[in-house]
């Protein structure tokens, strides 16, 4: 089941039922089952603290994914999304906030499905997958 929460801000995503169905269909199209997937929306400061505490990174980010799965084909996770950073990115890339929010959400899901973004080749494959699922 896909759920949505806010941690230290007041936020709810637009059309949560449609987003839930879209995320579920993405997971299923990749050959996995949907377990408990929680999207937690939070502030820039909250994300920075998560980044420092769990990843030892000292920069801002838009998404951090915590895989809660047991190695099976069922995907379960907590996916934290920095709403402030998503807004900044939407402005920077000249896209709507909703489009950028969906891109970040599917990015987190794709990490759970085994896609990386460390090398240029991985980044290219990640972008192609993002675009494919954004067009659904």
Image: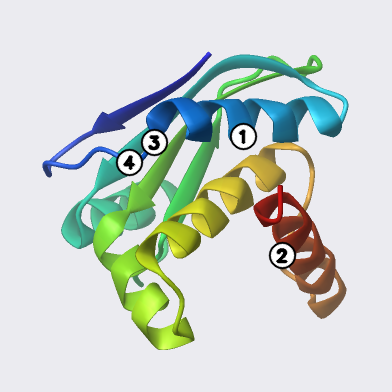
- The tag earlier along the polypeptide, 4 or 2, is 4
Q: Nearer the viewer, residue 61 or 93?
A: 93
Identify the residue shown where x is 44% and y is 84%: 94
Helix, strand or loop at mark 2: loop
- The tag earlier along the polypeptide, 2 or 3, is 3
Q: Nearer the viewer, residue 119 or 113?
A: 113
Residue carrying label 3: 15
Relative to residue 114, is residue 70 drawn left or right?
A: left
- The tag earlier along the polypeptide, 2 or 1, is 1
Viewer-nearest of discs 2 and 1: 1
Residue carrying label 4: 13
Residue 135 at x, y percent in the picture: 71, 55
11 vs 126: above or below: above
Whole-angstrom CA distance, mark 3 to mark 4, is 6 Å
Helix, strand or loop at mark 4: loop
Whole-angstrom CA distance, mark 2 to mark 1, is 22 Å
Viewer-nearest of discs 3 and 4: 3
Residue 127 at x, y percent in the picture: 74, 67
Q: Residues within 10 Å of mark 1 (few under 14, many from 20)?
A: some
Whole-angstrom CA distance, mark 4 to mark 1, is 13 Å
Residue carrying label 1: 22
Whole-angstrom CA distance, mark 4 to mark 2, is 25 Å
5 vs 11: above or below: above
- The tag earlier along the polypeptide, 4 or 1, is 4
Viewer-nearest of discs 2 and 3: 3
Residue carrying label 2: 117
Q: Residues within 10 Å of mark 2 (few under 14, many from 20)?
A: some
Residue 4 at x, y percent in the picture: 35, 28
Q: Are marks 3 and 4 in contact (CB under 8 Å)?
A: yes
């Amino acid at each position: 089941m896909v759920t949505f929460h806010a941690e230290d801000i007041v936020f709810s995503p637009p059309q949560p039922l449609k987003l839930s169905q879209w995320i579920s269909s993405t997971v299923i199209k990749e050959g996995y089952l949907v377990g408990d997937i929680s999207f937690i929306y939070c502030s820039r400061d909250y994300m920075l603290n998560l980044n420092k505490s769990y990843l030892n990174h000292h920069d801002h980010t838009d998404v951090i994914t915590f895989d809660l799965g047991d190695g099976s084909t069922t995907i379960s996770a907590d996916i934290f999304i920095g709403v402030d950073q998503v807004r900044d990115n939407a402005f920077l890339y000249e896209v709507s906030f909703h489009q950028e929010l969906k891109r970040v959400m599917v990015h987190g899901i794709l990490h759970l499905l085994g896609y990386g973004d460390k090398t240029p080749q991985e980044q290219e494959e990640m972008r192609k997958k993002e675009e494919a699922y954004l067009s659904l």
